[in-house]
Image (tube, rainbow, N blue to C red):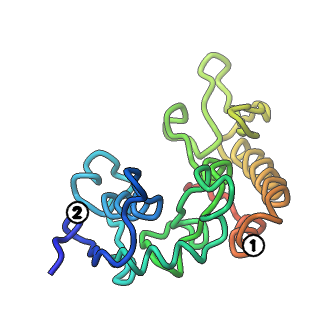
């Protein structure tokens, strides 16, 4: 019986974990995925609380074979593509063959929320205390933020953010359409920004 990896996964050693002295990319992804399902990780990153791995993905050989068949895993710029578990199903907490896809880093970062400046405001909104109004702003690539104006209410500012963000997500989806899994493209085109994000 093989020793459990991170107390969860099984590596039956039928697939390579290393190539020469370098860790195989699939193995690194697999171990990192397993780590995200541990209580120690949850204590550092509470947004991962409750994340699980499917029975199939607990097997490294299964995960390795699955990776080889996925769009974006073996392309020339594979190192800039990331394993994503919650694009196809928003808020998903299960790593599995039905919920995971590989996405370019640009797409993965596109959907991250920034909670640092907004306080109790919705995503894309913060209160400018100096003028006493809400500001909407949207990241439009490579760290470039576009101001969307001042609003009297959080909700008004959020609606401006939602419109701009959803439009930008569609632009990015169209730019990557030829390279990404069709399921990723469809999820991006249909993506809805919620006030609770």
Residue at 67% over, 48% down: 106
**What label sits on residue 6 in the rendered view?**
2
Q: Of 25 and 55, which appears nearest the observer?
A: 25
Residue at 60% over, 30% down: 127
Q: Position of residue 100 (x, y in %)?
A: 53, 71
Q: Quadrant of the N terminus?
A: bottom left
Which of the two marks, 1 or 2, is nearer to us in this view? Answer: 2
Asked which quadrant contains residue 145, the reply is top right
User: Disc 2 on helix, strand or loop?
Assistant: loop
Q: Residue furthest front?
A: 20
Query: Which numbered disc flags the more N-terminal residue, 1 or 2?
Result: 2
**What label sits on residue 186 in the rendered view?**
1
Q: Position of residue 80 (x, y in %)?
A: 61, 50
Asked which quadrant contains residue 134, the reply is top right
Q: Position of residue 45 (x, y in %)?
A: 34, 48
Residue at 67% over, 61% down: 75
Q: Could you give the CA–CA distance between mark 1 and mark 2, rounded to whole angstroms? A: 34 Å
Circles 1 and 2 in contact, beta carbons < 8 Å:
no
Q: Quadrant of the C terminus?
A: bottom right
Q: Position of residue 162 (x, y in %)?
A: 73, 51
- Image height check: is 124 above or below 146? below
């Amino acid at each position: 019986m093989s020793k459990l990896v991170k107390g969860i996964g099984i590596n039956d050693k039928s697939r390579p974990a290393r190539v020469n002295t370098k860790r195989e990319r699939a193995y690194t992804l697999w171990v990192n995925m397993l780590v995200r399902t541990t209580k120690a990780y949850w204590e550092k990153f509470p947004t991962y609380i409750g994340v699980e791995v499917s029975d199939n993905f607990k097997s490294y050989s299964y995960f390795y074979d699955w990776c080889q068949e996925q769009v974006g895993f073996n392309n020339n710029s594979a190192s800039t593509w990331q394993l994503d578990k919650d694009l196809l199903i928003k808020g998903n907490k299960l790593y599995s063959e039905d919920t995971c896809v590989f996405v370019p880093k640009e797409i993965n970062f596109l959907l991250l929320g920034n909670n640092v400046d907004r306080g109790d405001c919705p995503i894309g909104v913060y209160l400018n205390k100096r003028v006493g109004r809400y500001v909407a702003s949207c990241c439009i690539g490579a760290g470039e933020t576009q101001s969307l104006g001042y609003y009297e209410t959080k909700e008004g500012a959020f609606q401006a953010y939602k419109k701009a963000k959803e439009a930008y997500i569609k632009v990015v989806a169209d730019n990557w359409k030829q390279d990404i899994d069709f399921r990723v493209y469809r999820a991006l085109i249909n993506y809805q920004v919620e006030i609770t994000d």
